[in-house]
Amino acid sequence: MAKEKLTKEIKIPAIKNGTVIDHIPSRVTLKIIRLVDPQEFEHTISLALNLKSKKIGKKGVIKLSNRFLTKEEVSKVGILAPEATVSIIKDYKIKEKIHVKVSDMIEKIVKCSNPNCITNIEKVKTRFNIVTEHPLKIRCAYCERTMSRDDIKLN
Amino acid sequence: MTQNFKGRDIISIRDLSKQDILTILDVAKKLEDKPMPNLMKEKIMATLFFEPSTRTRLSFVSAMERLGGKVLGFENTEVTSVKKGETTWDTIKMIEQYADIIVQRHPIEGAARLAAEASSIPVINGGDGANQHPTQTLLDLYTIKKEKGKLDNLNIGFVGDLKYGRTVHSLCIAMSHFRTKLYFIAPDALQMPKSYLEDLDKKGIPYVIEKDLLKAAKDLDVIYMTRIQKERFPDPVEYNKLKGVYQIDKSLLNHTKKDVKILHPLPRVDEIKKELDDTENAAYFRQAGNGIPVRQAIIALVTGMI
Ligand SMILES: [Zn+2]
């Protein structure tokens, strides 16, 4: 534990104000960073991949300076990485730690992977039901296609 | 009991509980035994067929007219049936002013759910792309029940294109309400999608994956044949090789139980030889006929007329 903390401190500088997303499975870390639109963002973003984690094997960590996640963004993190934690940092201290989780019904934020789904053809807000949480499987309320986490594309 | 159907949409077999299914089959049986030619008098059904399906449409029209109701609607025969501009939502908002119940056929998956959300009158899904066709599933169940006298303790074999076969997927979901054993008989490339098998695992429904129909034949009470569509195969040689394997003729009956029943959602191409048609085992034409009482039951229940 102490060792892991040390590694983290060396690789990712602490931030004064902003958000730390931790315990992200490495393979979805890049998907999550895309949520914050990194090209458009002017403050520092630090990112580490393949850190050792007892809980999830290899993990990723993202630190966003001066950026706080909206409710919708937190739900998106929850869909991609329900194991992740989102910490709000104020003045180098953790002010709030959010354990993200998948809600029973996912609305709007996920795109259906079926190109012949009505939600991809007409202007319709998407809606998905959770089939199983571990591993995550969701079903489109319209076309009934099931998607696993790897198929999920966010809107 | 039938009260809870009034105003409901019939979009997906997943929306129906075991009790819902049994109620529909029950009402269908009553209507078959004792037709009610005036039940839907003064009522109008709108049939919105955004893609052609003559069989389904005629079955619905016949069902409604034999209940004394009227029908209006359209059937789009163009290949590109979804015109740009007018949305499903707007079409439904207009049509609901003209009718008491809507039957919709649409080439896009999920269009039925959207129509139901738009509509203040009941919507029946007459097929939405590769997704659902619940009235077909209900008439399949009705046929099994009528032919075999029960829905429990049956071995049901699905044969042919199980990967893309919409009717197979829905019937598999519906049968999982009952104590059955399912046999999926198809080439590897056309086997049942994993997500359906996982659902069966979760519900504890036993099933067998098999390539060879003859190997499974002796166990089966019902054989549900489907068409293997040429379009599914990039290689015509592969298609010709496979389609022959899943064609059946009278010789199959040497390997089956005497009272096995053969079902098929129709139309068939050549997967069931004509010589089987006049056997007691061939249930597929009776199956098509069963569409009438089943659709009558659904129409009557959701409009609250029964
Ligand atoms: Zn969809």
Image (spheres, coloured by chain):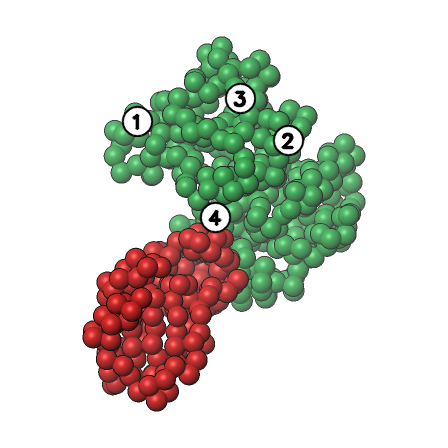
Give the answer, above or below, for where B272 lies relative to A113.
above
Decide which of tag 2 and tag 3 comes sooner along the chain. 2
- Which one is in front in this view, the residue at disc 1 or the one at disc 3? 3
- Which one is in front in this view, the residue at disc 2 or the one at disc 1? 2
Do callouts 4 and 1 mark residues in contact (Cβ within 8 Å)? no
Give the answer, above or below, for where B121 lies relative to B179.
below
How far is mark 2 from mark 1, CA to CA? 35 Å
Decide which of tag 1 and tag 3 comes sooner along the chain. 3
**Label 2, on which residue?**
B151
How far is mark 3 from mark 4, CA to CA? 27 Å
Mark 3 nearby-residue class (10 Å; few <14, some 14–19, many ≥20): many
Chain letter for red, please.
Answer: A
Q: Amino acid at mark 1?
A: Asn
Decide which of tag 2 and tag 1 comes sooner along the chain. 2
**Label 1, on which residue?**
B240
Beta carbon at label 1 within 8 Å of ligand 1: no
**Label 4, on which residue?**
B131
